[in-house]
Amino acid sequence: MADPGVTTGGTPELPPVAVAPAQPPVVEPPPKEPPPPIPEDPPPPLSGFPPPPAHFVYPPLQTNVEEYRVTMDPLGFQELLTTRTENIYPAEFTAPDGTKYPVEIRLRGNSSRGWPKKSYRIEFAPGVRFQGRNHLQLISAWREQTLMLEKLGYDMLEALGVPAPRVKYVRVVINGQYQGIYHDIERVDQSFLRNHGFVDTNASIWRCGMKNCEMKVVDDPAYNRPWEKKTNELLPSPELDAFMRLINRTPEPQFVEALSRSFELEHHLRTFVMDALNANATVEDSQSYVIYDAITRRWSYVPWDLNNTDAKYPIGANPEADFQHPLFNHSLFDGYVEKEYEYRSSGEAGRWKPIFSNLNTRLVLRPELRAHVLDLTEQALTELFAPSVIHARIDAIYELLKPHQPGSPYDSAAQFHDGPRYLKEYVANRTQFLRGELARWRSWKPGLSLQTVSPADGWVELKNLGTTPVSTAGLVLTTELRWAKVKTDILGLPLPGQPALLLGAQTLEPGATLRVSLPLADEGEVGLFDGVSVVGVLDALYYGKLPVGRHYARSLENPLEWEVR
């Protein structure tokens, strides 16, 4: 499965390693037996959510910007403004209708604690609800001076039918000092469960740790932070481990069926669409959520922190948005994964691995799911990004906010007023770029691919599914998809102890196969890479443990499908 966005030119010729001779093609495979069933007794109920909409329409825009007033100790407020304190302070919250509530206020976020315009969390007393919520998350949006992109991202999710936090604009005043326009973003908690139609209103919620959301069986403590359980914290959490095993260890022929029974798959595929339109980025820092509904026994993924978009307009930034983030965000096919990896590694060599979601990668590897995301993205470009639609939305938000922008001590008035021009230009550039991405992916054809994987026997067979000869020189077979390059010594010889194998130079004609010895675990992952890029994947397989005498093989009828033989 090659990434059509990666090229490999300039690979040096390296000493070949010994490989087993090519095996003759199997003309009549042994009779296939069904793969071992996944125990499911009894089958879980159907999703409790209504079907996602067939057409995408932005939700109605608010008609006024409410004012939230907070009164607190002046010294505490000064500490909030000038430090990254974890302290929590008592305060009084005055609602837009004048009702006063005793509350607690603290800083929220990570890097945003160092911004001049702070973000805040306000917590009401137990049992007290304001507009149906016990907590308020007031996000400053200081790094995005149009004040629109994060709001647009969440509005896109609502238009796509994905249960996600709702966002409204508010004006924040603390101790009589106007702080500016904020995003009041719905917190993912038990109120969220009630407000978005979860059957289990006491569902368990987990939050990805920093540098995570990779959906792995085992995290890497060198750079991953662990999951945080946000509800039902005192109860054991074996279901999260079981979900990670389902994502990573389900045999490929059963993967879509098994995932569809246990996961709101359609919702997640539609998050790819929002990611594409909004150029969503650095999901590893988003601390997004997963929710387990114990009544339906189904999982949901809830995206968070959409202000990381590559299109953001920071203070003093170039007045042209980055519109070239590839399709299939936070997967092994996202070229910006390498860009972020190289940036992090330049400061801390040896600590980092490429950070991407195993779930997203497995979804893209499935041709039918990949095609569905392409169709949804094309539809969204027509229905949500058409100039007649998105320009009107941008203009309406600007007119809503314009009377309240003056007076903010932290924001750039010039960049805010430039926002409509900036965003309309981004939409035009992004639309053209995405249409090119869609065409590229739709025209993709398989080339050198994994043909057979036999963990028990310790070998992998490659096959040239293309129409021209290919060379294996410099290609890498790896049993760890985050280890896509072979480390070599000063003579260019591979260093020992790596989970990757550097292939020697052999030419495979169309239809030819090559069997390569490779130590494989009973369950795990295996990938074929170009040896140049950490996202230069040509093909990959996540696999589960099989009964004795069975292996994975591509279907003779459809070479893009896997079977168990």
Image: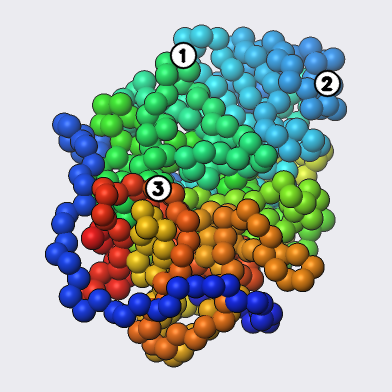
Q: Please, is residue 264 above or below residue 468 in the view?
A: above
> How far is disc 2 from disc 1 in space, using C-alphas?
33 Å
Q: Nearer the viewer, residue 250 or 176?
A: 250
* Quarter location, residue 557: bottom left
Quarter of the image with the N terminus is bottom left
Instruction: Please tell me which residue is depicted at 75% across the width and 53% down the height of the picture.
Output: 345
Residue 392: x %, y % from top left: 51, 60
Residue 138: x %, y % from top left: 63, 31
Marker disc for residue 523? 3
The secondary structure type at the circle numbered 3 is loop
* Quarter location, residue 183: top right
As shown in the figure, which amino acid type bears the numbered disc 2?
A: Glu
> How far is disc 3 from disc 2 in space, using C-alphas?
52 Å
Q: Nearer the viewer, residue 463 or 347?
A: 463
User: Count of labels shown?
Assistant: 3
> How far is disc 1 from disc 3 in space, using C-alphas?
31 Å
Instruction: Please tell me which residue is depicted at 69% across the width and 10% down the height of the picture.
Output: 90
Instruction: Please tell me which residue is depicted at 30% across the width and 65% down the height of the picture.
Output: 553
As shown in the figure, which amino acid type bears the numbered disc 1?
A: Leu
The secondary structure type at the circle numbered 1 is loop
Left/right placement of residue 420 relative to residue 42 reads: right
Q: Is residue 62 visible?
A: no
Marker disc for residue 234? 1
* Mark 2, residue position: 79
Quarter of the image with the C terminus is bottom left
Specify how the rendered protein is coloured: rainbow
Left/right placement of residue 336 relative to residue 317 reads: left
Q: Nearer the viewer, residue 117 or 453?
A: 453
State which tag comes first along the sequence, 3 or 2: 2
Instruction: Please tell me which residue is depicted at 32% across the width and 55% down the height of the picture.
Output: 252
Q: Please, is residue 545 above or below residue 201 in the view?
A: below
Of badges 3 and 2, the one in the foreground is 3
